[in-house]
Amino acid sequence: MLNLLDAPAATVKERAADNTVLVSPHHVSLAAGAGAADIISVAGYPTGRHHTLIKASEARLAIQSGASEVWVSLDASVADANAVLSELIAIREACPDPARLGLIVPDAPPAGAPLADATLKAAHQAGYQRLIVRSRKAADYAESAAGEEAKKKGPELAAATLPVLEFPAPAV
């Protein structure tokens, strides 16, 4: 996967062909036109401090423009679990199945923190398909004995029931 979030339009056009790309919402149509194999976009990125309706609109526009998946950023300063659940549901309603949604997990909250566990549960309840973390430390993948990729989660994500993916490094 190529992380082209910070790439200019010309770079997205050049590098998207036949690749899975992570692009900003305004570059989704460029990536689709360039023949990207799969397009992932973001909503509320990077701070999550956008109004819920803005995030939902951003996510829906990305899906309508050709993205198959949207990764959502949450405001790490929100301390109300109901507000988090409400926001995640609003975005899911704006992007119904088969659109895939991922939650960018706020920087490693302490293990067992009530809001951290509530956020992971809310993502599952709202129909999100994966969690995205910013460091390999939080999500460590290893090969299982059967040759399948198995999840081993750090303590920060022990309560997670969704697959965990590491946020890709920038490609430009």
Image (tube, rainbow, N blue to C red):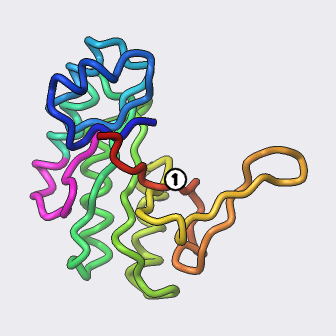
Q: In front: 108, or 43? A: 108
What residue span does the magenta drawing correspond to?
Answer: 41-55
- Dot 1 falls on a residue whose secondary structure is strand
> Which quadrant is the C terminus positioned in?
top left
The reply, left or right, for residue 19 in relation to residue 65 is right
- In magenta stretch: residue 48: yes
Q: In front: 97, or 137? A: 137
Q: Residue at x 31, y 53 (%)?
A: 89
Q: Residue at x 36, y 28 (%)?
A: 39
Q: In the rendered image, which quarter is residue 164 located in?
A: bottom right
Residue 167 on image: x %, y %: 42, 53
Q: In the rendered image, which quarter is residue 73 located in?
A: bottom left
Residue indicated by mark 1: 165
- The number of numbered badges drawn on the structure is 1
Q: Residue at x 44, y 56 (%)?
A: 132
The residue at the far front in this view is 172
Residue 2 on image: x %, y %: 40, 36
Q: In front: 86, or 40? A: 40
The reply, left or right, for residue 111 in relation to residue 55 is right
- In magenta stretch: residue 85: no
Q: Residue at x 34, y 37 (%)?
A: 22
Residue 20 on image: x %, y %: 44, 28
Other-residue count near label 1 (Cα within 10 Å), few / some / many at <14 / 14–19 / ≥20:
many
Question: Residue flagged by tag 1: what amino acid is it?
Answer: Leu
Q: Is residue 132 above or below residue 79?
A: above
